[in-house]
Image: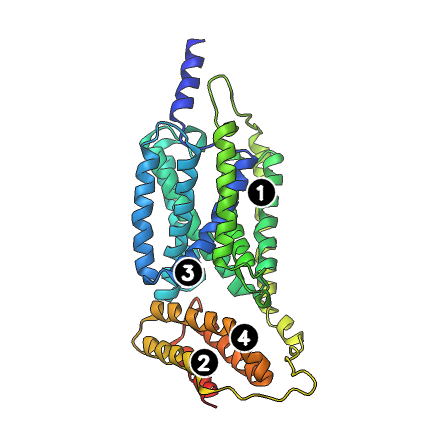
Amino acid sequence: MTTTATTGRRRELLNKVPEVTLWFWVIKILCTTVGESLADYINVNLGLGLSGTAVLFTVVLAASLVWQFRQPRYVPSVYWLTVVVVSVTGTLYTDILTDQWAVPLWLSSTVFGVLLAIVFAIWFSREQTLSIHTINTVPREAFYWLTVLVTFALGTATGDGILELTGWTPGQSVLFPAALIAVVAIGWRQGANPVLAFWLAYILTRPLGANLGDFFGFDTIDGGLGVGTLGTSLIFLAAIAVTVLYLTRSRVDVTTAGRTTATRTSSASTQRQVLIGWLVAAAVAAAVLGYASQHKGSATLAEGPSAAPTLAPGQAVVPFTAADLASFRTVTTSTLDLIAQGQQDQAVTRVKDLETGWDDSQAALQAKDPERWTTLDGKIDDVLTSVRAKQPDAGAEKAALDALSAGLRG
């Protein structure tokens, strides 16, 4: 009796992570979505550039981890705040590799995958367990948070890689990791190794959340809901706050003395059978990605051109004035200068002004000359695509900006 009570008390005071309930997975996906949308919004609007923003959030992450490590037990608000900060920071690290160092997404995914395997190997060799039910020492907590950071970076790279490889819209890309998570959940129900099942699902929730963030944030023309990165961040942050408040009051994800979490036990042969099933599912997933990669252009080619806006009956075309287009010429010129100087981060920030200004003036300009507005709108889309590319090409950026500049002068 004494031993049991002591063990339960130690668990209550020292285990630093929540129990894995449905609420755990709900809020984890919310946090990963915020990591994608908030990182994109801050990077574009803060004005510090990608490197400056990453440095800032590294400092914030360090402060959050210090706060988390100082807690004597799992505290929902502190824990999940740290997860959000880790999510944003991990996303920024991946974006630096892709956008600044031009590291291909498949390579960064491989690097982070190998790094994750190394962290797991060292963690297990030292602690003889990878279970999150015993995060009750400083070394185990350190291994846990390092693993979480690497999984977020890995998930960001693989999520973006799926979009780049397949050409799927954000909405379509959400289904892929969701299906894989379902396969993992089925395997867990059938008797898979619970620790392996947990970490597989944990890794897969990152691309799911990242693609979900893109689905909410992207414009409708790009297959998204058009909520925007800021709107998406605010919606999901509010959902996180409500969920954390509920968890804080209900304590449904906290194990206390006398209350244990149900565990699943299965034979080694059952675990091997499930593992084989997962390997087959992984092979099928790879085949799906390969097929989508080979056919990613077919949907676009099959679509006909969009109908251009037209003038109302009896309405005459009103030519754009120099004043109508002056601000767009200024932004185009300054963006060209930034790219010529190798200041890609600043160029990305600058074209945001182009996008915002063009959207704000759409009603007035489109009413004057719908045909020319459509032509310029296409050129601006080309500029935004080239400048914001995961692997920007200076030649393509310059060509798109030169074409826009010529269109604005015409």
Q: Nearer the viewer, mark 2 or mark 4?
A: 4
Counting other residues with Cα less than 10 Å from the Cα at mark 2, is it few (<14), some (14-19), or many (20 or more)?
many
Q: Amino acid at mark 2?
A: Ala
Q: Which mark is residue 184?
A: 1
The residue drawn where x is 30% and y is 38% is 66
The reply to whether the C-beta atoms of the residues labelled 3 and 2 are less than 8 Å apart is: no
Q: Is residue 113 visible?
A: no
Instruction: Using the image as rendered, state which of residue 164 and residue 33 is in the foreground.
Output: 33
Mark toward the start of the polypeptide (2 vs 4): 4
C-alpha span from label 2 to label 4: 20 Å
Q: Which residue is mark 4?
A: 362
Mark toward the start of the polypeptide (3 vs 2): 3
Q: Nearer the viewer, mark 4 or mark 1?
A: 4
> From the viewer's perspective, is 409 left or right of 223?
left
The residue drawn where x is 54% and y is 80% is 365
Q: Which residue is mark 3?
A: 107
Q: Which residue is mark 2?
A: 400
> From the viewer's perspective, is 55 left or right of 369?
left
Instruction: Using the image as rendered, state which of residue 370 and residue 229 is in the foreground.
Output: 370
The residue drawn where x is 51% and y is 71% is 359
